Amino acid sequence: MRKLVAEFIGTGWLVLGGCGSAVLAAAYPDLGIGFLGVALAFGLTVVTMAYAIGHISGCHLNPAVTVGLWTGGRFPTGDVIPYIAAQVLGGIAGVLYIIASGQAGFDLANGFASNGYGAHSPGHYSLLSAFVTEVVMSFMFLFVILGATHKLASPQMAGLAIGLALTLIHLISIPVTNTSVNPARSTGPALFVGDWATSQLWMFWVAPLIGAAIAGVVYRWLCPDNEYRSVS
């Protein structure tokens, strides 16, 4: 239960910090933080939670991470569904909506940091471009996570490496999909927006899970089982 509560809080922080920066600060008059600021915000949420709850739950904060660690032999099967449930609940906790809706003129039609493709992609990228982007970015995210948390890597630097990887991923892919690589992060805003956001949500589950699962298999092949730090 402590692990699940940690995942709930951590995922809520990721959505509030990352999506909150996009909704509240990205285009704020004169002082907007832009794409770079949003990318850094997502990375910082992971860095801060890695050191806050990494020793409690492993700091997944993301169903794709849980699945990738599972296919990589780093996570027990029985914990996969409970972790994903806690992450999704954390992603839809609603704190960001309560804050954002207090501004005069607030309108969910502006997207609420939802992920999308086609007409709802920031750069109007196609479904194929968005799908490939999410698969590749999720693959690379898990690849970095698996490497940074390997028993031969420096444990003190793992959180920083993973946070920087997420920052880089956002710098690449915000124009394409508004960057998901995390089904829980996508689900929260989409449920508040509804309409197109929920109809496109499937892609932001399928693509990250595929990319993460492949990364787990590939890294497990690169580093045999007996070289992993056990988490089960």
Image (spheres, rainbow, N blue to C red):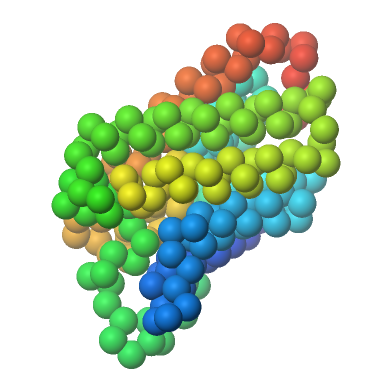
- State the residue at coordinates (37%, 62%): 113
| Residue 211 sits in quarter | top left
Residue 25 x, y percent position in the rendering: 46, 73
- State the residue at coordinates (23%, 70%): 109
- State the residue at coordinates (31%, 45%): 176
Give the mark count.
0
Q: Can residue 198 be spotted in the picture?
A: no
Seen from this angle, which residue lies furthest front? Answer: 30
With respect to residue 100, does 223 lie above or below? above
- Side of 192 where 223 appears, left or right: right
Q: Quadrant of the C terminus?
A: top right
Residue 206 x, y percent position in the rendering: 35, 34
- State the residue at coordinates (49%, 28%): 139
With respect to residue 49, does 153 lie above or below? above
Residue 190 x, y percent position in the rendering: 32, 58
140 and 1: which is toward the camera? 140
Residue 7 x, y percent position in the rendering: 63, 51
161 and 4: which is toward the camera? 161
Seen from this angle, which residue lies furthest bottom? Answer: 104
With respect to residue 78, does 71 lie above or below? above
